[in-house]
Amino acid sequence: MMKYGENMKIGIVTPYHSNFGGGEVFIESLNSYINTESTFDSFIFTSDREVFKSESILIPNINSYKNLSKNLFGIIRVLKKQSIDIVIINDVFLATFSCIFKFFGFRTVSLLHLELSNVKCSNALLSEFVVNMRRHLISLGSNTILSVNKTNINYLSKKAKYVGNFVDYDFFSAAQGNREHAEYDFIYVGRLVEVKNVEQIVGAFDEYVRKFDNDSKMLIVGEGPQKKEIIDIINSRSLHNNVRLQGFVHRDKIRDYYMNAKVCILLSLSEGFPTVLLEAMATGMPCISTNVGSCSEIVGKGTGAIVKLDNNSEIASIMYELVSNCEKYSDTARLKSREYASDVVLEKLVGDLK
């Protein structure tokens, strides 16, 4: 019987959610690492082949229950046609159907980025039911569960392993200039969606501008369905001269934007292990974050601050402390991010597949 790891074929199955974010960065790098540094052959299966630089294989759309119920067995056929041995499911929603992949003979690995507890439901009992259902179905259907954030380990079976996130070495090579002369005091990088809580970032920045610096500038990098709402908030607070919305920036150029700001801010309601924090810190930037997912693993003393969402005035004061002393955090931030260098994390992750 062939051991896993010897000439096996891996299929990374990922629904595409109309934005290239940290999850897509993760699997693109994972796919490349597997193909160059292991005995596996790896392929990305996605409904949008334009998203990834790596060569990918087209599958039907599976970004909703309706599409999944209609197309799941079509995806199984595509995987069988490609003689895939191991399926890596890169989505919490799809991982709840891991039993079906396992039934068809695939060794099934659920790769979880977001927190299982992230449920859009105001009813506490129903939310608890959904979380327990996710936990049970994913544990039952997966041969191995790999979680990018530590909080999921509390919900899952013993087969779950914490793998963490990583940052590409390219970000460590960013020029180490003097951030005191950066154009922007603050930068947000990410999707413009409800869970990222960008409207509160604007609110906290408004508080900062009124209390500390009328001329302060903030850069928002990203696209998403909340863009118009965020523009309306910016205009209603008369911040149109203080806040710039850059839109989507390709990863080849994102380092330049980090280097032109002093502090990275992320006030998400839920997270996995944000790539943006690791990237910002790799360039020597202190970060502000909420205590969700694995954010507190890297953000804290010497690298930035963890904040609570209930007081924008306190957040503004922390923003002032970090932006006034951004240079003193630089070395510690870089050192902390190096613990999550891509080859260190990916080598361990691929070892967990064997």
Image: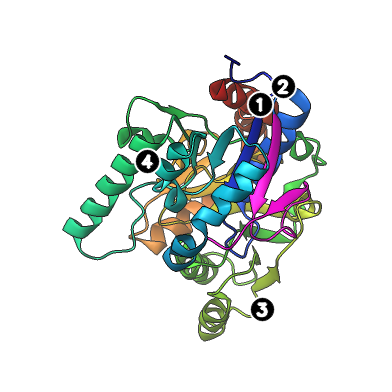
Circle 1 crowding by C-alpha within 10 Å: few under 14, some 14–19, many from 20: some
- In the displayed structure, would residue 306 be above or below residue 245? above
Q: Mark on residue 8? A: 1
Locate residue 150, reporting x and y percent: 41, 34
Nearest to N terminus: mark 4 or mark 2 = 2
- Name which residue lies at 33% across and 43% down: 137
Residue at which label 3 appears: 241
Sequence order check: which comes first, mark 3 or mark 1?
A: 1
Question: Which type of secondary structure does the marked residue at label 1 adopt?
Answer: loop
Segment colored magenta = 41-62
Give the CA separation, mark 3 to mark 2: 54 Å
Few, some or many residues within 10 Å of mark 4 (<14, 14–19, 20+):
many
Q: CA distance from mark 3 to mark 1?
A: 55 Å
State the mark number for residue 138.
Answer: 4
Q: Is residue 192 magenta?
A: no
For mark 2, what is the residue? Answer: 39
Q: State the residue in front, 65 or 284.
A: 65
Q: Please name the amino acid that badge 1 sits on.
A: Met
Q: Mark 3: give few (<14), some (14-19) or many (20+) Cα within 10 Å.
A: few
Circles 3 and 1 in contact, beta carbons < 8 Å: no
Dot 4 amino acid type: Ile
Q: Position of residue 114 (x, y in %)?
A: 45, 48
SS class of the residue under badge 4?
helix
Residue 206: give its label: none
N-terminal of the pair, mark 3 or mark 2, is 2
